Amino acid sequence: MRNIDLPPIWLLGFIVLVWVAARLLPGWVSDTPELDGLGRGFVLIGMGLTIFALVSFRRAKTTPIPHRRAAALITTGLYERSRNPIYLADVFILTGAILWIGIWPMLVLVPMVVWVLTIRFIKPEEARLRE
């Protein structure tokens, strides 16, 4: 189970939920160019954050996989500003997907994904790093 308990899988699940909601509740969908553009921007920012963070992991020769022990603590680059830039990126990507799909009432899922990331990944990671 730990092999599939990964943030990208959770993110994909939330995005699929948004997509399904848009299909089942077409009256909730607002197809506006402003939301499309804003959504695309959020997704691009999230993808960029993820790429930069993964480059940091590669340079530090440590794993980005949350359930594994880190070989190093990254404190440079994005990690000077945020302890969890990949999780921040996931929030940007989900927010962007919701806006891009045009079903903005589903923004209520954003705090839910933050909660899942915190409980499933951030708290256990921080505990391992303190060890």
Image (cartoon, rainbow, N blue to C red):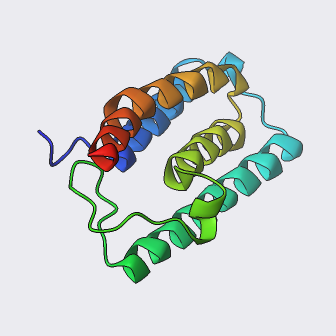
Where is residue 8 shown, x and y percent of the image?
38, 49
**Would you place residue 86 above or below residue 16 in this image?**
below
Viewer-side residue, 130 vs 70:
130
**Residue drawn 86% across and 46% down?**
33
How many numbered callouts? Answer: 0
Q: Residue furthest bottom?
A: 59
**The image quarter in which residue 110 lies:** top right
Viewer-side residue, 16 vs 41:
41
Left or right side of 51 for 124: left
Q: Residue furthest left?
A: 1
Left or right side of 109 for 71: left
Viewer-side residue, 96 vs 86:
86
**Residue drawn 43% across and 41% down?**
11
Left or right side of 119 for 42: right
**Would you place residue 54 above or below residue 116 in this image?**
below
**Residue drawn 47% across and 24% down?**
115
Left or right side of 31 for 14: left
Where is residue 105 shown, x and y percent of the image?
69, 19
Q: Residue furthest right?
A: 34
**Would you place residue 79 above or below residue 128 in this image?**
below
Looking at the rendered image, the quarter that the N terminus falls into is top left
Where is residue 120 shown, x and y percent of the image?
32, 32
**The image quarter in which residue 99 lies:** top right
**Residue drawn 28% across and 61% down?**
70
**Would you place residue 67 above or below residue 116 in this image?**
below
**The image quarter in which residue 76 lies:** bottom right
Where is residue 84 shown, x and y percent of the image?
52, 49
